[in-house]
Amino acid sequence: MSILITNIAELMTQDAEQRVLRDVAVVIEGERIAWIGAAAGAPAADEAVDAGGRAVLPGWVDSHTHLIFAGDRTAEFEARMAGESYSAGGIAVTTGATRATSDFDLTRLALGRVAEAVSQGTTYLETKTGYGLDVENEARSARIASTVADEVTYLGAHLVPAGADAGEYTDLVCGPMLAAVRPYVQWADVFCERGAFSEDQSRRVLQACREAGLGLRVHGNQLGEGPGVRLAVEFGAASVDHVNYLAAADVEALAASWSGWNAGDGAAGGSSGSGPRGTVATCLPACDLSTRQPLAPARELLDAGVQIALASNCNPGTSYTSSMAFCVTTAVLQMRLSVQEAVRAATYGGALALGRERGNDVDGERAVGSIAVGHRADLHLLNAPSATHLAYRPGIPLTHAVWRAGVPQRVR
Ligand SMILES: N=CN[C@@H](CCC(=O)O)C(=O)O
Ligand SMILES: [Zn+2]
């Protein structure tokens, strides 16, 4: 099955050269992008789509969500809006509700959240465990997550359950719980923060998970300065997420982690980035607003040479939204990113945080988060002539059509 999309006003490729192409056409063949160029030279296709002078972007890559949960934390949100501050303790409320919910209902709830994200332009997403917090429920969360998301992260180290000893619980996370989730997950994460896991406990979790062959990420520097970023860089984590409170040394360490990386080799057919990846700083603007934390210093990070991602952090406590468009809008209006930078962070940046930014027909892997021949056909057609409208028309639902791995998706 092939699809020819014509009459595209602006194609924001986020490819190696960060090209923005005008008046072009795209051919999708099966799950891949097969051709890009002027419509007059397009090969024949089974189906034709007239984009009507609209803009096309890569689908959003949401590299940080927590979708495997039941229950509701409206009361906690209301208290926060009335002046209470966020603390990690709310995770226990969701854990109770999640444990009490059947596999069938947890799966149904998670699938509904994925559908909501996809209908707004998300085409590749990660999700985490972390509301099970015992061996049985973490394994169950991981198994369900592996059926609904593209990438799964083990977050047994989300909160020490009430009544548990922190050291003993960390042993469990590093031992039997890790063994139980291992068949279902590619990544591991630790909430390294006051009220959650200390530096020593976080280090043990990262060490054990690395030995188990998992890629690493860290929730760090959300509620204050701390060891999260430093640990993430030391362990070669793919990302450190939140990054609200950064010391100068944290920014320097993140920037240094990218020093051996070459951002683009466009000549090699559109795949981008070579050399060892550093640690992506993942900014979560919807979470920052909902917890009334200072916005992560995305501008400063970019200016220092750090690769950043934007993600929704969709979860019931700190960020109950899957809207990547909202994150992009906020990044432009309030974090001082250009539209190109914000869209890049929400597409290519997310792919970089998940190690999925490379690959075309040559190596068998298909890159996500950018538009180039051989990459996965994840396209987001906006109901607007340019991506600038994402910030220019805040709050307006602009998703017109979505293709995920070449398959058209339902848009509400
Ligand atoms: N910071 C840690 N975990 C989540 C919040 C989880 C919750 O409060 O339920 C976050 O990313 O913000
Ligand atoms: Zn999170």
Image (cartoon, helix red, strand yellow):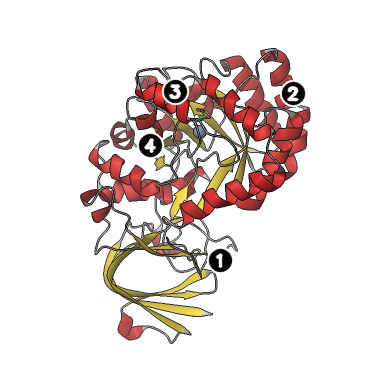
Q: Amino acid at mark 1?
A: Val
Q: Earlier in the sequence, mark 2 or mark 4?
A: 2
Frontmost residue, 246 versus 273: 246
- The quarter holding residue 59 reads bottom left
Q: Residue at x 66, y 52 (%)?
A: 147
Q: Which residue is mark 4?
A: 286
Chain-order first, disc 3 or disc 1: 3
Label 2 belongs to which residue? 172
Q: Name the N-terminal-most of marks 2 and 3.
A: 2
Residue tagged by mark 3? 221
User: Residue at coordinates 54% horizontally, 61% vertically from top-left?
Assistant: 366
Does any portion of residue 355 appear in the rendered image? Answer: no
The disc placed on residue 362 is 1
Q: Is mark 1 within 8 Å of ligand 2?
A: no
Q: Position of residue 285 (x, y in %)?
A: 36, 36
Mark 2 touches mark 4? (CB < 8 Å): no
Q: In the structure shown, which secondary structural element does the residue marked by tag 2 occupy?
A: helix
Residue farthest to the left, as pictured: 392
